[in-house]
Amino acid sequence: MATTSSCSTSGHFISSTTQEETSNRKAQPEILIENWDRMSSIRVLKTLTIGKGITMDLSVDESEPEDSIKRFFAQVVSTGEEAFKVPPHWHKHHAEYMTVLEGRAKISCKGETVELKAGDPAFFIPRRAVHSIEGFEGERLVVQERPDPPGMYKAMFFNDLLSDGEFGGFWKTMRAFWDGDAYPAFPLYFRAIDEAFLFVFGGIAKLFVAEKPQEL
């Protein structure tokens, strides 16, 4: 589990394949076989709709151990018909690694914005760091998110949040955030305000919004 509190592109967990690496691999059949074996071990558990031309695959790499950061991930594919956007939010109990496989995305973390492109190292988002993600309209984007600590809990959160097809309404989102370690971020950047907001509205939502699904 990562312990740093800084947003970074250290890439110590994984990085995308560069064009040079791809060229080298063409001359190394044993590496191609290894990559094929890895691809065959990846299982898509469920595909969710986020928006127009935007889907999310909840996946598991069964070749990796349960405690590996590489085992559980969500992969978003956006055709560019509509820009992929995740509004500012933060997590109290888990961190994230973001990796762009195709295209580019703007990632804002703790008040700073970077452009992450295919081939860049994974971008680390520490817990309690306010962050947002945005793709570009008209551009294809493929981005992966891996939770730290690893586990199925993040897939269950996305399945809950997007179970109705695309994002639910206000009350559904508040209940999903309450159950999923997600906090909306307000411009004042006071975590206490964010927590109080979710405590009130998430608590109310728990009274009448359908419970979180217990399986995908």
Image (cartoon, grey):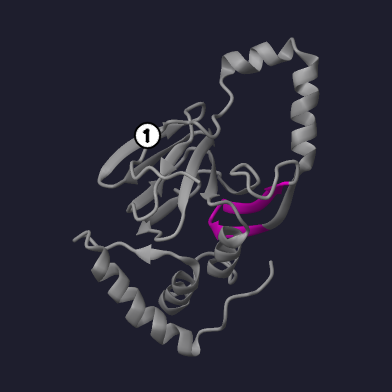
Question: What residue do we see at 37% from left, 65% from top?
Answer: 183
Q: How many numbered discs, if any?
A: 1
Which residue is the extreme one toward the left? 188
Dominant SS of magenta comes to strand
Q: Is residue 16 above or below residue 193?
A: above
Q: Position of residue 62 (x, y in %)?
A: 75, 46
Q: The C terminus is located in which quarter?
A: bottom right
Q: Quadrant of residue 191?
A: bottom left
Question: What residue do we see at 44% from left, 60% from top?
Answer: 93
Q: Is residue 30 left or right of residue 24?
A: right
**In this view of the protein, can residue 136 be seen by the observer?**
no
Q: Position of residue 175 (x, y in %)?
A: 46, 77
Q: Is residue 204 above or below residue 176?
A: below
**In this view of the protein, can residue 207 be seen by the observer?**
yes
Q: Is residue 152 above or below residue 32?
A: below
- Reply yes or no: does residue 116 show up in magenta: no
What element does badge 1 sit on? strand
Q: Amino acid at mark 1?
A: Glu
Q: Position of residue 18 (x, y in %)?
A: 56, 21
Label 1, residues with CA under 10 Å away: few <14, some 14-19, many ≥20: few
> Magenta segment range?
47-61
Question: What residue do we see at 35% from left, 51% from top?
Answer: 131
Q: Is residue 135 left or right of residue 74?
A: left
Q: Is residue 178 above or below residue 66?
A: below
Question: What residue do we see at 53% from left, 55% from top?
Answer: 52
Give the labeled residue for mark 1: 115
- Could you say which is closer to the camera, residue 90 or residue 103? 90
Q: Position of residue 86 (x, y in %)?
A: 41, 54
